[in-house]
Amino acid sequence: MLQRFHDIPDVFSLNCPTRMVLDRLADKWAMLLLRRLMDGPTRFNQLHRDIQGISHKVLSQTLKKLERDGLISRQAFATVPVTVEYRATPLGETLSGTVAQISLWAETNITEILQAQDAYDTRAETL
Amino acid sequence: MLQRFHDIPDVFSLNCPTRMVLDRLADKWAMLLLRRLMDGPTRFNQLHRDIQGISHKVLSQTLKKLERDGLISRQAFATVPVTVEYRATPLGETLSGTVAQISLWAETNITEILQAQDAYDTRAETL
DNA sequence: TCAGTAGGTTACCTCAAGGAAACCGCCATG
DNA sequence: CATGGCGGTTTCCTTGAGGTAACCTACTGA
């Protein structure tokens, strides 16, 4: 009963796949991780060092979520201190390509956005 | 000193434009709103009715953020009960196009994701 | 006069995300 | 002997996002 909208598909309903994926990507770390793993398989602590600002715990949680979604894979090696490598799956790679387009958009339009913010803030001050 | 990574641009630094945009989009309502406004200018309460689950307050806040970023524009009409219309700006429209690709990806791959989740959960249970 | 619509803002409260830090086993190095 | 790296998990605590609901102006209709 929730999805009775005019002609719009069901983007605004709660069980819409798009919405599900957006919610997952809404995790800012997820996108970053996915992008980082496009550069090749990487170990836990290497990721932790590379991605500035993420905590130990959240990194662990986010990796789990991505693995559950089949976007990345985890491989443990029985080396002396156990080594664990994460890498993007083929599925993850296709998504990463899409995310890269957002990056491109962002880099292209960041100036315009910042200008819009300045203009907005200036307007607000003069009120 | 934060952005000394091998060949990767500065995607992982804090002031990276991509990261900024991702953070904004990370707001699940923002994406939904942007998409909804692609269907034409819409008034506040209409948006509130259409986008299931968003609260009065959060709708208001999200619209402000998007307006500040120059992605949507707000136009008030001095009608009897004041009428306010929101619409996507040209900038907002270009982003919306990119977001639409994520939707497409989501619709294409949702089955695979759900299967991956099932497999993962099954594996977890058997442990 | 009371209710309803339009477009908000404000106050209050709750709940969950996330940071910090400790702990785990196991090994190597100083 | 103890510190550090590896790959985590668990506990504790804080903060902030977001829900609910009341309030606002201004007008219309019953």
Image (cartoon, coloured by chain):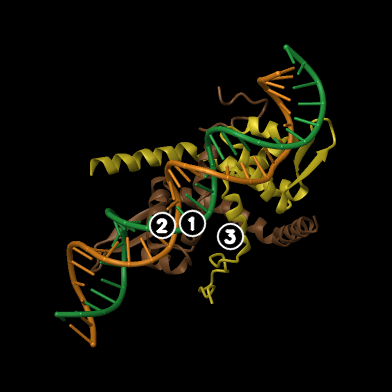
Chain colours: A yellow, B brown, C green, D orange
Label 2 is placed on what type of residue?
Val
| SS assignment at label 1 | helix
- The quarter of the picture where the C terminus of chain B appears is bottom right
Callout 3: residue from which chain?
A
* Residue at x-position 53% and y-position 73%: A2
* Residue at which label 2 appears: B58
* Residue at which label 1 appears: B29
Front residue of this view, candidates D12 and C4? D12
Pointer 2 with pointer 1, Cβ within 8 A: yes
- Position of residue A2 relative to residue A21, above or below, is below
Seen from this angle, which residue lies furthest right? Answer: A78
Label 1 is placed on what type of residue?
Trp
User: How far is the residue under mark 2 from the one under mark 1?
Assistant: 9 Å
- Position of residue C8 relative to residue A47, above or below, is below
Question: What is the total number of numbered labels drawn onto the structure image?
Answer: 3
Mark 2 vs mark 1: same chain? yes
Callout 1: residue from which chain?
B
What numbered label is drawn on residue A19?
Answer: 3
Callout 2: residue from which chain?
B
Label 3 is placed on what type of residue?
Arg
Mark 2 or mark 1, earlier in chain: 1
Q: Nearer the viewer, mark 2 or mark 1?
A: 2
Front residue of this view, candidates A39 and B115? B115
Residue B17 in the image: x percent, y percent?
52, 36
Q: Is residue A40 visible?
A: no
| For residue B46, side relative to residue A61 (left or right) | left
Residue C22 in the image: x percent, y percent?
60, 34
* Residue at x-position 49% and y-position 46%: B24
* Residue at x-position 71% and y-position 53%: A68
Mark 3 vs mark 2: same chain? no
| SS assignment at label 3 | helix
| For residue D14, side relative to residue B14 (left or right) | left
